[in-house]
Image (spheres, coloured by chain):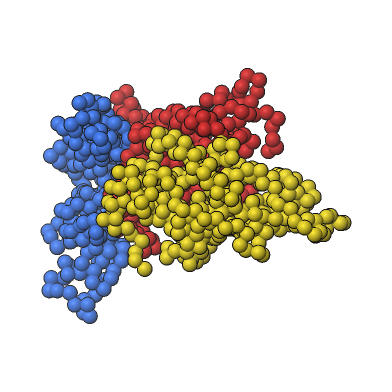
Chain colours: A red, B yellow, C blue
Amino acid sequence: MSKPEKLLDKKGLRLDGRKLDELRPIKMEVGVLNNADGSAYLEQGKNKVLAAVYGPKEVHPKHLALADRAILRCRYHMAPFSVEERKSPAPSRREIELSKVIREALEPAVFLEYYPRTAIDIFIEILQADGGTRCAGITTAALALADAGVPMRDLVVACAAGKVDGKLALDLMDLEDKYGEADVPLAMMPGINAVTLLQMDGSLTLEEFQKAVKMAMEGCKQIYEMQKKALKAKYVAIKEEIQE
Amino acid sequence: MISSIVSRVKQKQIAQLIAKGIRLDGRKLTDYREIKIEAGIIERAEGSARVLLGKTQVLVGVKIEVGEPFPDVPDQGVLTVNAELVPLASPTFEPGPPDENSIELARVVDRGIRESKAIALEELCIKPGKKVFIIFIDVYVLNHDGNLIDASGLAALAALLNTKMYNYELENDEIVRKPGYTPLPIRNHPVAVTFGKINNQLVVDPWLEEEQVMDARLTITTDKNENICAIQKGGSGYFTTQQILDATKIAKEKAEELRKLVVEP
Amino acid sequence: MPTFFEPKELVTPGDLLAEGNYMAGENAYCENKKVFAARIGLVEYDNRKVRVVALRAFYIPRIGDIVIGIVTEVGFNGWEVDINAPYTAVLRASDVLERGFRPQKNDLLSILDIGDLIVAKVAAYDRGSNPIIKISEPGLGKISRGQLIKVTPTKIPRIIGRKGSMITMIKRETNCRITLGQNGLIIVSGKNHEDERLAIMALRKIEEESHTSGLTDRIAEMIRKQKEGRKNV
């Protein structure tokens, strides 16, 4: 995709018609894979993300096990067909880094100390990518963890804010990320005001950065409510069916 | 080797001291260790620098080669950052392909240089779409005593400022070397400042013993215009919003101090 | 000292359940005098204790639990058994062989083979080592017939019902023997396939609707309807 002339129109609306502080349409579903102990699927704009959790289970190879807590392992991976030009399925340096920061974004939420000598595996597959996939991956993985019955301090939710055409904007899509001035992905546990992932690239003044963090947090809180609803959906539906 | 598991006694000691605003090695919470920078120590490299951050030791070499540009930016040079956690630097470093730690280190250093537009890559084009200069920045960790990111970032910047390009002319699309050198076009000076969170408090420039007990890490890279150009949170803990805001302010001040050491020695 | 949900209300991890002088029970945790949910489930306030009856959880062994397991490996002095938990259970040969175990003589494979299904009791378990199970008590041991089904372990109490009311009713109505493992594995064995199918259907319905009220009546009605349907064919 080549660079569009402008990322914002005269009214200040974005290429997909969104306002600056507006999230893309989001859809979530929990419990979508029956082999996994927990799973979830998410669409955020054109992003399509699948996450699965296996465990806690015995660690293989055994020497990786820790005597005092479970280990969390995370693989963030993009499908070869998820982007415009085919991506080699071998893990790239970007994917290795993202797997690490995503794991570190989820770790603070999980009571790993409850299950020594075990492993919890998280697999995140990006089936289609349109910017903000690390955040979408975290949001989805948190749902899969909860679905697996892994005890958690809070759900982890992620969202990015950034700067496009000189204005701060929420939830950047690929074109805005690529041709905008900055991107600040952030993950948090909203219930206990804990930021568990924070990255940035681009250029922002101190003041802009503070505003971007605030904006990303507002986005997170909106998505957090959707996460809770998605987790409860199945049980609420059954209850309603019976009461009818 | 004595196991890298920190004894509970030491863990407690570090935390208690920090609660009082001091650190095991006598520093205050926002003090850096002593920094020494030596530039131009590898003659075969176009640019090089060694940074000593306390006992942490990082060597960066810059090599320049001619190659093809990326198709989406045909008129710009290419920047590549790689980091090696050399096994001689720590009992915890294993030989083998780069692991997630060395990849993260390289990518955080890369992000600071790239996002601050430190190198004028557009001036490194030889023939658009065909030939450009490729700048290889190789980070070589020689001794690991904590805070590799800041040491590597400083060493990379010092090496870039020290990098010389040979003069050339194009004859029949081939590069012909001419006598003399010109410095690499450097436009900005990104500096990373890393925090550790220990006992719910921020400390600047955590050394190894602090890294082993800290809950989380936060690196903030600012450029010479005091803009933030890169951030990376690491570690399995979290930060509060207030801690992040505090960190950005401290980072700005500290980066200014560090920048002086590299840019105007 | 407020509480923030109605009893039995559905909560998710991170929900603030109570503040003040409360204790965190199962699937809840306490931080700075606040009690939060740690799993998706139904909140229960029991005096000062706040807990969550989890709708999604996995089995963690407790000493004395009856579990159902599958033999996965035969070693020199015992067996490894998958008990649907994060840890593989160990069944020692000395527990099974009355006169003491002699490695040169006794052939463990002839006693329990890989793939065999057993009912066992958790004899020992702590954080440091894998659970040890035993089968040397009446009612325990190898199972040779029946169908194995798996449910979320936290729903076993619901399947048992108050004072066993639910499980007794299902057994009576379907003429099946039902062995419940606290680890979420259940063996259903009846005179014919139809009876077993009916019992499994009832168990599945309980699993799905465990968070609703009036469940015993609905299950009884379902079984009755199914039986009538069968007669009419």
In the picture shown, does residue C178 fall above or below C158? below
Drawn side of residue A190 relative to residue C224, left or right = right
Drawn side of residue B130 relative to residue C204, left or right = right
Q: Quadrant of the N terminus of chain A?
A: top right
Residue B160 vs residue A230, the one in the foreground = B160
Residue sitting at x 43%, y 36%: B246
In the picture shown, does residue A11 fall above or below C152? above
Drawn side of residue B24 relative to residue A26, left or right = left
Q: Can residue C50 be seen here?
A: yes
Among all residues in the image, which is located at the extreme bottom? C104
Residue A21 picture location, percent across and down: 52, 25
Among all residues in the image, which is located at the extreme right? B172
Q: Quadrant of the C terminus of chain A?
A: top left
Residue C61 vs residue C27, the one in the foreground = C27
In the picture shown, does residue A242 fall above or below B118? above
Residue sitting at x 22%, y 49%: C182
Residue sitting at x 39%, y 52%: B211
Q: Can residue C148 be seen here?
A: no
Residue C68 picture location, percent across and down: 24, 55
Drawn side of residue B59 relative to residue A233, left or right = right
Q: Tally the numbered discs.
A: 0
Among all residues in the image, which is located at the extreme front? B265
Residue B54 picture location, percent across and down: 45, 56
Place residue B237 in its image quadrant: top left
Place residue B29 in its image quadrant: top left
Residue sitting at x 20%, y 60%: C133
Residue B223 vs residue A56, the one in the foreground = B223
Residue C88 picture location, percent across and down: 28, 59
Residue A34 vs residue C232, the one in the foreground = A34
